[in-house]
Image (spheres, rainbow, N blue to C red):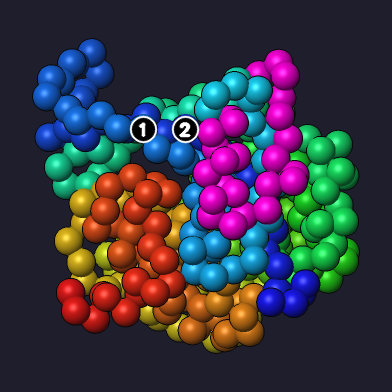
Amino acid sequence: MTQSNKIVVVGSCNTDMVIKADRLPIPGETILGGTFFMNPGGKGANQAVAAARMGGTVTLIAKTGNDVFGKQSVMLYKAENIKTDFIFSDAKNPSGVALITVDSQGENCIVVASGANAFLTPTDINKASVEIEGSSLVLMQLEIPIETVEYVAEMAHTKGIKVILNPAPARALSDDLLKNLYMIIPNKSEAEILSGIKVSDIESAKQAADIISSKGVDIVVITLGPQGALIKDYLEYHYVEASKVEAVDTTGAGDSFCGSVCVGLSEGKSILDSVKMAARAAALTVTRMGAQTSTPYRSELSSLDAI
């Protein structure tokens, strides 16, 4: 691939500690009989791995602690062919950790201790500015400081680089940030926060997309889980159906989707074709446990036709 196909992901990396149980506990309740496993995670890292496995040329800009979790994470990213030169090590703060409980229906609840992720600053970004300026796409999420997200978005946008934001975890965003985005990829609840519209079906998703795009974002893609995805591409709408699969764990599905969309765009695919590929990647992801461990490779997408 040429330099201009490069995808830069700026975001978080965590270690996920996962317990699979029959159901999610209510406050004050202890549930016995769960299964435990540990995975690399964090939305930034998940999306970088998804893009790399889809065949993208990927650099991850992130911050870890100077601890065993951080060092292990960097080794794993290198094994995925992700460029790790700009994963900074924080001497004062631990690596990020997420505690995840998954029930028998594949639903989850997550608590994140951000650690070093909360200290990825514009000063760090300046050290990676040449890398960002040599890319075609920058992908971000909201598990790092919002000031850093805004700083990267402005830097990239002024250089004519497409900025894609997955606004998760959900929060309100400034109009200044939205104006610097090429594409935003919220799920239903995130779209509701950004638009004030309750998203329950395709029609309400269109209304939400109209409001979000009116704030200056060129393209809005709202992911609707089993209902598929709605695209608003300037004045055009497209709907992409979800593949019918048996969900085991929904963790990481959105991350697979976002990373895959970026690869499609970096290869010159249309928005519609990029989202179709991403929807297939997300569908495969929910059939497996874990975040990065469940992320499919490009060669696996054809296996959906047999499901």
Residue assigned mark 2: 15
From this view, report whether residue 104 is shown above or below residue 240: above
Q: Which residues are magenta?
A: 70-93
The answer to which of 151 and 259 lies nearer the viewer is: 259
Q: Mark 1–mark 2 contact, CB under 8 Å?
A: yes
Amino acid type for the residue under numbered disc 2? Thr
Question: Which residue corresponds to the image point at 64% horizontal and 60% vertical from the top-left?
Answer: 58
Residue assigned mark 1: 38
Callout 2: helix, strand or loop?
strand
Residue 203 visible in the picture: no
Graded by Cα atoms within 10 Å as few (under 14), some (14 to 19) or many (20 or more), the crowding at tag 1 reads some
Graded by Cα atoms within 10 Å as few (under 14), some (14 to 19) or many (20 or more), the crowding at tag 2 reads many
Amino acid type for the residue under numbered disc 1? Met
Question: Which residue corresponds to the image point at 41% horizontal and 66% vertical from the top-left?
Answer: 297
- When asked about the image quadrant of residue 212, the answer is bottom right
From this view, report whether residue 243 is shown above or below residue 184: below
Between disc 1 and disc 2, whose residue precedes?
A: 2
**Viewport quadrant of the N terminus:** bottom right
From this view, report whether residue 97 is shown above or below residue 159: above
* Residue 131 appears left or right of 228: right
Q: Residue 35, percent across and down? A: 19, 30
- The alpha-carbon separation of the residues under discs 1 and 2 comes to 7 Å
Q: Residue 166, percent across and down? A: 56, 55
Can residue 78 be found in the magenta stretch?
A: yes
Callout 1: helix, strand or loop?
strand
Question: Which residue corresponds to the image point at 30% horizontal and 72% vertical from the top-left?
Answer: 242
